[in-house]
Amino acid sequence: MSTQNLLLELFVEELPPKALKKIGAAFAETLQASLQAQGLLSADSVLTAFASPRRLGVHLTKVLEQADDKAVMQKLMPAAVGLGADGKATPALLKKLAALGADESAVAGLKRESDGKADVLYFNSTITGVMLSDGLQKALEETLGKLPIPKVMAYQLADGWETVNFVRPAHGLVAMYGADVLPISALGLRAGCTTHGHRFEAGIDPVYIRNADSYAAQIATEGAVIASFAERRAEIVRQLAVAAAEAGSNLTPIEDEALLDEVTGLVERPNVLMGQFEEAFLEVPQECLILTMKANQKYFPLLDSKGNLSNKFLIVSNIRPADASTVIGGNERVVRPRLADAKFFFDQDRKKTLASRVAGLDKVVYHNKLGTQGERIARVRAIAQAIAGKLGVDAQQADTAAQLAKADLLTDMVGEFPELQGIMGRYYAQHDGLPATVADAIEDHYKPRFAGDELPRNPVGIVVALADKLETLVGLFSIGQVPTGDKDPFALRRHALGIIRMLIESKLDIGINDLIAAAEKPFNGLSAEHRSALLTFIFDRLANALREQGYSAQEIDAVLALQPQRLADVADRLAAVRAFAALPEAASLAAANKRVGNILKKVEGTVAAQVDTALLKEPAEVALNQTLTTVKPQAEAAFARGDYTASLQALAALRNPVDAFFDGVMVNAEDVALRNNRQGLLATLHQAMNQVADISKLAA
């Protein structure tokens, strides 16, 4: 079957820039997948995606004009139903064949096979391969229906009667197979071979596409558009680097992947220009200036080698005038009032201390069931003081930082830029003359804010961050606001992961139950159900994090089954389990441990881990007890000094005595005293084997 290359372009009004990358990739990949499923693509077909502010496009190589015919064997019905006693077709079978376009003459060719229960009739037929025009029409409809569109709009077509729904009004459709136009339609548009280039700088309008392969070059030369999102993004990166080098030898544009994607979604032919503002604005915290330039104007601030903001910034323009001074001057005039506002907010905010703002938090509702921000701060302070006492951190500084942590929410700067909460609190705390540790803790109590974010920089910050996150978790769990499915409006998963990271990476010597106990006290306690749910939630988050780090499900289950209190030890426990699993004795001991656990579960009440040596009758139980008497203290001593690998490896000596015990000793003896003593021996064994991890989880 012959092949040619295919081009499809949908020309639309300006697409949402933040979503363009995702929409463009989905458009291309979904179309390709649909054509592939219909058998219209060669095995080595190559996809090229196009996505600019005003177009979504796809180029595919080696596309079939018609898919290959396909043999299909279709199950009809049981032979007993389809054929009478005389072997002739029943009315039911004839009706089924007619629905498939066949008649009674096909009965002789039916295949008869058993499905394990009865003989079944099968009909062999050939499905004619789909034509490209039909397959592309289906693929385009499927693609448009599956696009990850943030918000759909409804608009009327040119006839004034029909209304269609799409992310933005569509005005053109190109579908070319080689040099031929394919007869497809979508969104009220018939496919043709014309499109439009840059809104202001296209050399020709409209652009007549000669064939599928000339599209990218034509739209670039005649239409002044870089249609590929990836190529346009790379060109912006290149121009940013060149412009930064021209601005100063030690200046670099700020790194921001989201901003880069958004700007790529705003321009069709990028032109990077440099602007600047008065150095006096640099007195304002650079986070404020950077945020307003990025968020409001989509500029790339320039930083020096130390990461300090310069008074120069880069503009990604969509036009290339001969004299760019007007464009640069216009952008400088636009950014100046923004920076002036930031300076005004900063100056005004410093006229009041953070401490004077705390009372205002009593008027800010935190949650209708959990009270105001003021009430929340009181709880965070109590939790922070409790944690500080357990960790030996300055409780007074922790209390001060916790008290002032949310005060900057009432400042003008944070009111304008909520993203600066905590950051501005640190600046204002410094202005108020507070210790650096307190100021840093005010900013850092939000950390870690996302995966890979840095932890608070000092112990006071760690304490307040733990208190803040624990207060959120305990408070919301106490009222049943638990994440369900993908919904987590209060970011409780992120809070739990933040707590886990601080406990592990800062090697904090505090148990998770102690933390929860401290956090629930200001709430007058948690119900047993809510406490258990919260503990399970935290360990589930830990398990997910460990899986991402490459630990196996068995290793994780073995360690977390014991719900170890000091999370800083989890990595060492996992390493010990991995080393133990490599021992030749591991499989036998894991199976034996599982068996011991099952036996003890069936005993009513609690079995004390104690043995009366006078009641040991069988040689195997005597030998096991003697080995345990030697091994158990060794394992416990290694465990006590934190050498979990040695603790587990000491258990290897138990393999033969344990195997011999189960081969030669009846645990549930008729003699009650013997039975209880043997159960006590097993409880002692179980206790010795499960200090580091539940090794029964390693059993096959």
Image (cartoon, rainbow, N blue to C red):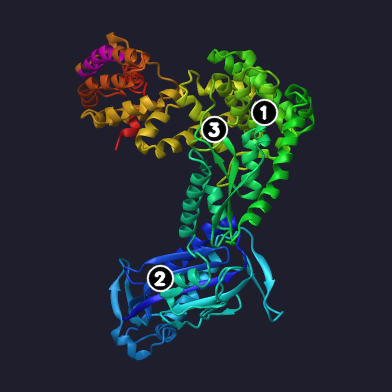
Q: How far apart are marks 3 and 2 (CA)?
A: 44 Å
Residue 483 seen in the figure: yes
Please name whichever residue, 11 or 549, is drawn nearer the observer in this view of the structure: 11
Secondary element under disc 3, as helix, strand or loop, is: loop
Where is residue 134? Give x, y as percent: 46, 80
Check disc 1: other Cα within 10 Å, few if <14, some if 14-19, many if 20+: many
Seen at 58% across and 36% down, the residue is: 309
Position of residue 446 relative to residue 507, above or below, is below
Where is residue 386? Give x, y as percent: 61, 16
Check disc 2: other Cα within 10 Å, few if <14, some if 14-19, many if 20+: many
Tag of residue 425: 1
- Magenta segment: does it hold 625? yes
Nearest to the eye among marks 3 and 2: give it. Answer: 2
Residue beneath disc 2: 60
Tag of residue 448: 3
Q: What stretch is highlighted in magenta?
A: 620-632
Where is residue 444? Give x, y as percent: 58, 28
Q: Is residue 266 left or right of residue 84?
A: right
